[in-house]
Structures are given as C-alpha cells and as structure tokens.
Image (cartoon, rainbow, N blue to C red):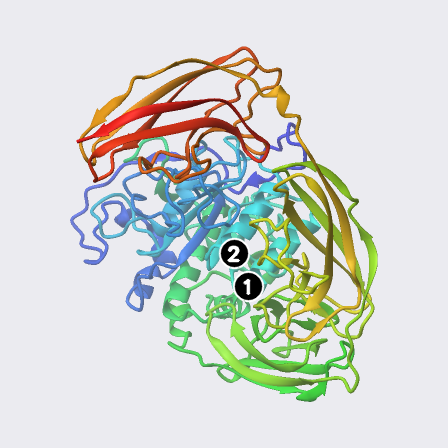
Amino acid sequence: MTWFASLPMPGFQLANTGMPTKLIAEESPLQIQATANDPLFVQQDNLKQLKVESAWDITTGNSFVVALIDTGINAGHEDLVNKLWVNQREVANNGIDDDGNGYVDDINGYNFIHNTNDILDNNGHGTSVASIIAASTNNNKGIAGINWNAKIMALKALNSLGGGEYTHVISAIRYAVDNGARVINMSFGTYIENSDLETAVNYAISKGVTVVAAAGNNSQNGLLYPANYPSSIAVGAVDDVGIRASFSNYGSNLDIMAPGVNIPAAHYEENDTYARYSGTSYAAAHITGLVSLMLAKNSSLTPPQIESLLKAATLGSSNTFEYGSGLVDARKVLDAISQSVAITANIATSTNSLLANGTDSSQVTITIKAGNSVAISRSVRLRIKNGPVRINDIDTTAELVDLGATDSEGKLSFRLSSYLPGEKQLTFIDAVLGTELGSVTVQFNNLSSSFYKADLVSKSPDLTLSAGDSANLWVELKNTGNVPWSGVGDNKNQFRLGAAQPKDRLSLLADDSWISGNRAATLEQAVVYPGEVGRISFNIKTKSAGTYKEYFSPVVEYISWFNLPLSWNITVKKEETSNYQVELISRSGDIELNRGEMGALTVVFKNTGNISWPMTNTGAVRLGTTQLMDRQSRFYGNSWVSKNRATDMGFEISPGSEIALTFAITAPDTAGVYYESFKLVSEYVTWFGPTVTWRIKVI
C-alpha cells in the first residue's frame, strides 16, 4: 500500500489489496434461503464460510449503532439507503450544535478531515466495508448484510486517497464512544505506533465499546496499528478454502480470521453496482457485523467477553502465529451466548461515618460480576447526591463522575472524603447498560470547632464613570477558615458578596445581573476549600452623577457574615449638556383617528451640536414624552421602546446629520381632543431641544 508523504504525520493505509472486480447478478434456479432474497446472495460464499446463514436462525440483528471510521459512505446506494445512524438530538442543517457535543449538524456522523457533516465517500472503501456489515437484507436488491438492522455511524477520517492523520482518527474514536456506538470498525492501519491512538482505543474499551481492526495486507510478521494493540480485536484474512490469504499480516497479537478474498460488496460510484474486493479490511468488516449480532443477542456483553467468545468459537488452528485462534464460526459464537447474563455488584466501604475535614477518607470498593464470572474492564459511573466530595484527594462538584473500569478481579476502588458535612449518597451505574448497580451512604460529621474566615488577596481598582455606564468589579479572597465555601446550589449555605454598612442594604449601583438588590454575586468556583483563593466578579450600573462609596462583605447565607468590609469609590461624572444641540426641521400635521385606530406621526431633527447621538448604552437619544416628562402616553403602541419612549434613533446620529423619526400611535377608546408632547432625551444625561406637540382628535 501507499504512504502519503504530504500528510503532516505518518498516515494510515487502507487494508484492501487493489482495484475491485465489478460484479453482475447471476441467474440461479436455487432458493438458497427464503429470508435472504437478495439476488447476489447466491454469490456470497463468504457468508456461508463464516456460518452466517445458520447464525441468522438465532438473530438477524437489531438497530445497534456500528461506527465506521473510514473514507465516508455513499448513503444513496440502493443497499445502504436508510441504513445510516440518525442523531435524534440534532436538528438537520440549521448551523447549530443542538446537542452540545462539539459538532454542528452531525446528523449521520461527521467529516473530521474538513470539520463538516459531509460524509460522502470519494474513495469507495467505506461504502464497500459498510455494505458487508449492514447492507439491506431481504430487499430484492444486491447483497445481504450480516446484520439486517444495524445502523452505520459514518465517521470520515480518511481522505480520497485512503490516507489519514492520527488526530482525525482519534477524534472519530472518541466521537463514536461518546455518541452511542457499541462497536467500531477500523479497516486501516499504520506501522507507526502512537500513544494517543492507543489511549483512544483503550478509552473505547473502558466504555464498553468493542474495537475491531484489520491486521494489514503487507504479508509480514507484524500487525498494523490499531490492530496490534492488545485491547482491539485483530482480524486476518483467509481465502475461500480457509487458507491464510497471501497478503494477510500475521503475528503474536493476531486474534482471529475471517473471509477476505473476492468478497462481494457495494461499489460506491453508482447506486446500484457491486464488485468483489480483497483485503483484511473486509475480513474485519465480517467480524464487526458478527459482533453486532452478538450484542443483539445479549447487549450486556463487554469487549473482553466478546473477544473471548470469538476466540473460543473457531474452527481451531494449530498455527496461532499465522491464524490466531482460527476462522470464526458465527453460529457457534451465538450458541455460546446466554440470552441474559445477570450483572451484579457488591459495594463495600471501610467506614460509613467520618469527619468532614477533607483528609479523613473511606475506602470504597465495588466488585462487579457478569453471571458467575468477574466483569473485567467494566466501565462504572458514580452519581453523587449532596456533594461536593473528594475522590482520591481530587475535588469534584459534578453529580455524575466516570470512575473508570474494573481491574482483572472485577474491582474498582477509590478514597472518598469531603469538607462539607452531611450524608453523601453514592449510586453506582453500569456505563454500558446505564443501569444502577447499587447505592451506599457515607456520613460526614461536623468538626468539633468550625469557623468561617477570609483574607483579602486583591480587588479591582476604584472607578470613574459616566451616568448610565456599566462596569465590572471583582475581588479575590483566601479561605483562611476551616470550612469550604460553596458557589453552587440554592441560597442556603451559599457564599455570596452582600451589600453592607448596613448589611442587606439595597445598593444604588445594583445591576440586573445581580442575584438580588443586596447580593452582587457568588463565587466563580463551585467550591473553595480552606487555603484556596476564590474570586467573585460582578457588574455595576450607574444611574446619576455623584460620588459613591459602595461597601460589601462576604456572607454565607443563613449562617454567618464575615468580618471583612470591602469598599469601592465610584465617581459618576456629570455630562456636559451644552454639547447637545438640535434643530426641528419639520413635523407631520395634526391627525384625526377613530377610537382604537392606529396612526403614524413623523418628526425630522438635525443634530446641530458637536457630539454624536448614541443609539444604545450611556446617553442613548430617544423621543420621550413630556409635559409632564416621562408620563405614560395614552397613545402608547407595541412598537414603542416603553410607555414613555416613542422611539429611539435606530443608529448613531453624527453632528450635522438629519434623522426622520416615524412612530405609530394607537387611539384610546375615549373620544376627545388630545395634545401629545414629546422631546429628545439623552438617557441619564439630559433633556434637550424643542417640545413637539400634536393635536389628535379621537372620534
């Protein structure tokens, strides 16, 4: 195979052996199997060799998600229509990452090469591999797929030449795991080992996702990576009589064999064409399809259990170096699987009662069994109620934590401690099935002597602002007590910065973002332990000119105020109002309306001053009601800024420019003659210009 020197890192090679041979359906008088009426099924000796036909008597599969990391897929091919996985949490083609997984519009998978959702196959390899795994079966078209119902998650990480980069493949593996795939097919490889790639493969295994990889087509002693990693299932190829294909790699890490010579599969260039292919790519695809059948029979199977079952259900081999455990027998594999294996767990703690001092800990151990066997590499999650806690001396505020996978004895252990008193409930969850394994409670007791104390580390400087300005203030405080501060949860026990001198005073500089008129904000951190530094950041908003000394103090709600006064000097300067000058150019005439009828008024102003009129923020210029100023108008309409602001400028008005303001009015339900007056106002600065009055008759 070819290596692509243009790649920034050593690339991957596809595990197929050359150009395909086009395939044409043959007329056959034989009815091979009533449940597989696909016209090319009679030519799929590879499925007979793998004993897939008799395996279908047990299960034809279900809609488990199979991740295909490859060159993409031709989803329009007649045997792959409606076979793609659909991300139900994503809205198609709206340009938004609806499910928050970091990928926009990933409806059927993702293109990691170009960072788009375009998964179209422009090489052909991905389409052919996908069809072996899950081509539509019993549809009177083309070939039969091994799993009749599986859905393909198309992850395009290889380019049109079949080359790729580690970063793209690694991202695709993690995407597959995090988005619901149960098995990953990787029919490609490289001789260059990469620790990040191995970490990604092990991550998949720890989450209960089986990794199937092609051994490679170099006819060499030594497998390609990722097949050469012990945790993946490495697949070599045999010919139609069970002899190792001349191109198939071999070696000590080879696990099993599958058909890989002259395999019928979908051809990508046209939507109704097929061809014969050779390579360990296609041998791996057979095993991926079989793994999906295994999971259809028992969804609780772990990757190590799946690998063990596959190796045990072979035709046998005396030459394990070249054949691994031998050619797999699909029927034998499914016969060996119990329909349901009970997953049980035993949870033990070294103590269920200890001090909440952050150092005393309870050793928590969970032991998991699948039936009568220990569950090795079983991924476990922990749901924490009444946190935060410390796990292995690392603080966590999350309610759901990934603990990792069980060891060779089916065990997983950690140390549990906490700074916060109370009963912590720990619920263990099987990450593969999502089912609860059991719960345990640990009581953390109050210290005999607890106290809250804070020292000032630094704070933002004093400020000079204009009326209507917003600004940010911040303070950093060191926890010098022996009790942690919490920045999460409800108002009980939460650490906040409260207005002080006097306490609970309503601040004149309170902003809409404040918790309340006398509580500026809580911690940026979820929790600040003794000895750590916490930070509080909050906005203020000025309203009128003057000099303000704003006092605050930390407070733990319903528990204690701190003896630490904090203050800022805020100077709000008065705007020079002589800069605001205006000339009335024209106005529309008086108007007559029926009761409830809508009308429109227009006035044209010219900015004759020496400053621009801003549209938003400090000094925004609007047309406000006057006589009396700020009165609520009877002619208020939904298009108004407020009941006393008919309209704003719409854009900034520079000196010398004119602006025509047109606004809607709605006549009241009471007939009569009304006089409506308006004047320009620069918010929080000054009223200016002439008063404009209309006579409005309502009939």
Residue at 60 percent across and 40 percent down: it is 12
Residue 300: x and y in percent read 45, 71
In primary-sequence order, the first of circles 1 and 2 is: 2
447 with respect to 540 (left or right): right
Residue 559: x and y in percent read 68, 75
Between 323 and 110, which is closer to the camera in this rendering? Answer: 110
Between 22 and 447, which is closer to the camera in this rendering? Answer: 447
Crowd rating for badge 1 (residues with CA inside 10 Å; few <14, some 14–19, many 20+): many
Callout 2 amino acid: Val
Question: Is residue 319 visible in the rendered structure shown here?
Answer: no
Q: Residue 207 has which mark?
A: 1
Quarter of the figure with residue 596: top left
Quarter of the figure with residue 96: top left
Callout 1 amino acid: Lys
Residue 385: x and y in percent read 56, 75
Residues under numbered marks 1 and 2 in contact, where contact means CB atoms less than 8 Å apart: yes
Residue at 31 percent across and 69 percent down: it is 58
Residue at 52 percent across and 50 percent down: it is 175
Q: Residue 177 has which mark?
A: 2
Residue 49: x and y in percent read 38, 57
